[in-house]
Every structure is written in C-alpha cells, then in structure tokens.
Image (cartoon, helix red, strand yellow):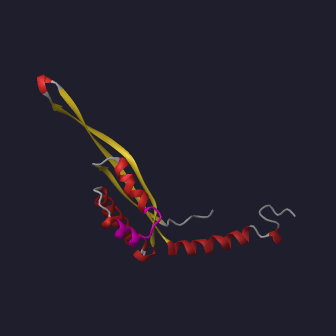
Amino acid sequence: MIKKKKTEIYALGQHISMSAHKARRVIDQIRGRSYEETLMILELMPYRACYSIFKLVYSAAANASYNMDSNETNLIISKAEVNEGTTVKKLRPRARGRSFPIKRPTCHITIGVKDTSLDEYEDEYMTMIHQSVYNKSRGGIWGKK
C-alpha cells in the first residue's frame, strides 16, 4: 500500500463576522498565487476582509514552516474557500412597541498552502513506482502478455 505524503497545510478561521460574499471577493484574487505575492496583494487591497484573510494566510505559512519545515518562498495558496457561518439575529426596538430584526452574517474561511519543493520529490517517487509497477516488459499489473 502506498501512503501519500501530506503536502498541504491548512489554517481555518471560524465565525468571522462578515458576509461570505464580501470575503469571497478577496479570496478569488489570491487563490493559486505564491505566499509572498499574496501578502503584498492583501496589504494593498482596500477591503475590510483583507485583514482577517491576511492573518489566516500568515498562520497557514507558520503552520507549514513548523509542521513540515517548509521555506516560505516555496509556498503557494493551493486552496482558499469561504463558507457561510451562522447568522447572529438580534431585535432592534422600533416605534410603537414594534421590533425590527438585525442579521449579522458570519463566515468560515479555509486557507490551504502547499510546498512546491515537496511536490517535486513526490512526483519523482510516484514516477519511479509507476514505472516499476506498470512496466510493459513484465506484462503490467496482472502479468498478462
């Protein structure tokens, strides 16, 4: 049995008080970019969501350097997603004893970083296994000719 090495590290932020739609506007700009480029983009964008996402990207890079001894120059943002969280509902008093609902949306943000230097080693290893298992001179997996 072949065990796949874990090359992706995550940072998860839950119950962040902002709309998921507003956070997705920023997340779509950073998905697939390098770590250093992402930090520059987030510092220069004028949206409120950038601060929370900046902290999560920084945390994901710290997790990668601690858990996998990765260098920050080799990291890319491989997964960035925003899901809707719970909605905090409050009642605001209005005239004549009535009330008006206030809805505060929250969201959950997941940032995944991948080390590109580890992928090269894994690809070489998988290619070596693939060539030895699926070698045509030996008849493939089942030994049929």
Q: Residue at 33% of width from left, 59% of height from top?
A: 53
Q: Please determine whether, in this image, residue 43 is positioned above or below residue 85.
A: below
Left or right: 22 as drawn, with respect to 100 = right
Q: Residue at 32% of width from left, 51% of height from top?
A: 14
Residue 71 can be seen in this image: no
53, 120: nearer the viewer: 53
Name which quarter of the figure residue 104 lies in.
Answer: top left
Q: Please determine whether, in this image, residue 113 is positioned above or below residue 23.
A: below
Q: Residue furthest left?
A: 96
Quarter of the N terminus within the rendering = bottom right
Left or right: 124 as drawn, with respect to 30 = right
In the image, the segment drawn in magenta is 30-41
Q: Is residue 126 magenta?
A: no
| Percent x, y of residue 88 | 26, 39
Q: Residue furthest top?
A: 96
Q: Is residue 38 magenta?
A: yes
Q: Residue at 39% of width from left, 67% of height from top?
A: 38
| Percent x, y of residue 108 | 36, 50
| Percent x, y of residue 137 | 83, 72
9, 97: nearer the viewer: 97
Residue 105 can be seen in this image: yes
Quarter of the C terminus within the rendering = bottom right
| Percent x, y of residue 66 | 37, 71
Dominant secondary structure, magenta = helix
